[in-house]
Image (spheres, rainbow, N blue to C red):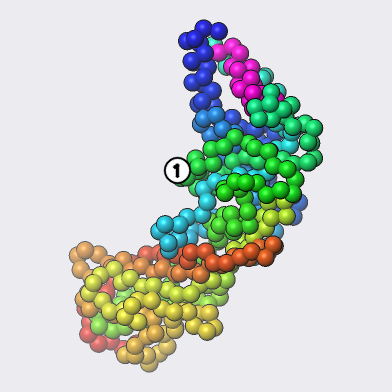
Amino acid sequence: MTSTRMRVQIAILLALPLALVPTMAQAGSKTGDGASLGDAKGGRKGQNITVQTKVRTTVDGASHTAKTGSLSSADGNWTPPACWYEPAFSPKEIQATVKAWRGFDISLLDGIGDFIGDALDTRYKDGHPYKNYNLDKQGEGMFWAAAVNPNRKDDPEANSCDKPPFWVDEGEPPKEPLAVSPQVLAEYAYDELPVPDTEIEMAPTDKSTVNLPTWIWLDKAKFKKRSVTASLPGTGLSATTTAEPVSLHIEPGTADAQTYPSSGECAINADGSIGEPYAKGKADQTPPCGVSYLRATGDDGPFPLRATVTWKISWTSTNGQGGDLPDGTFGTTQDVTVREIQSVNR
């Protein structure tokens, strides 16, 4: 092989996604109880092998697919993990992968499959560091490989798990900080929490009036605890992450407004509701949650009122571990038109 051709083949190798073929069929599949398997894409650029995660999720204990939530961490320095390592391949599967790559070919690059197979065999067959794919240890452990959080596959941190698959004996925790654990599962479940849209109730519903309070509240039936359980089949690892609404923050969309309370932070009531529905005869009363606009909207259009719910996040696991995760927030913006009338009957 000429040096030029070798350089070309090495360049192709570095650009190819080295996905382990035996697990590709698992993507997007369902388990027997109706839960969903993760859909992380196997393979990344470079000489590493990545896998489709086998972590599955259920919502509120029900065996249906968890929908990705839209929570943002209130802690700007924290996000759920972008990748981790999980048990992925038996010795026979590593051997099958090398064989599959040896059958791979590209026009004008004869022998590229064998070239990749030789590179894999250096690690998994020839004793650097593994000998004969660890076939003598079949059933005594697994090769752990990098898996990417499907919700964060475009994050730069998704490249942090850059180790090729490594062996872990059955029953021994891997000596790897990014190895999957109950906390990693809990943090993954954070990304899967299906919180409802922050659709507030307002009175008046059509137009607000200068200097008169607009009452704001949230339906307690919609805003209740939600839980997602993430588990990794065959490992006994499982964690449940729970989101509980704790407050509603109001941003009027203009400095010419007064919020109630003045902080704009409406706490949750004992019955789980936020704020208080408007009732006839309360037009001149101060609402527990609301806003008064001090000027009317003009040619610039309506005010963009922003309503953001803060959710307290906690987690538990089957091995007794648990704790709190950073609060999550989710908000929506809606237009409010304010009319220039000083007194009205409501």
- The structure residue drawn at horizontal position 48% and vertical position 64%, both measured from the top left corner, is 326
Residue 103 placement (x, y as % from top left): 67, 19
Part of the protein shown in magenta: 109-125
- The structure residue drawn at horizontal position 53% and vertical position 79%, both measured from the top left corner, is 272
Q: Is residue 268 visible?
A: yes
Residue 341 placement (x, y as % from top left): 23, 82
Question: Which quadrant would the N terminus be assigned to in this image?
Answer: top right
User: Main structural element of the magenta stretch: helix, strand or loop?
Assistant: helix
- The structure residue drawn at horizontal position 65% and vertical position 27%, both measured from the top left corner, is 128
Q: Secondary structure at mark 1?
A: helix
Q: Which residue is mark 1?
A: 156
Look at the picture and state if 81 lies above or below 124: below
Label 1 sits on what residue type?
A: Pro
- The structure residue drawn at horizontal position 47% and vertical position 55%, both measured from the top left corner, is 79
> Badge 1 local density, few (<14 within 10 Å), some, or many (20+)?
few
Residue 114 horizontal side relative to residue 14, left or right? right
Q: Report how many numbered discs are placed on residues in the image.
A: 1
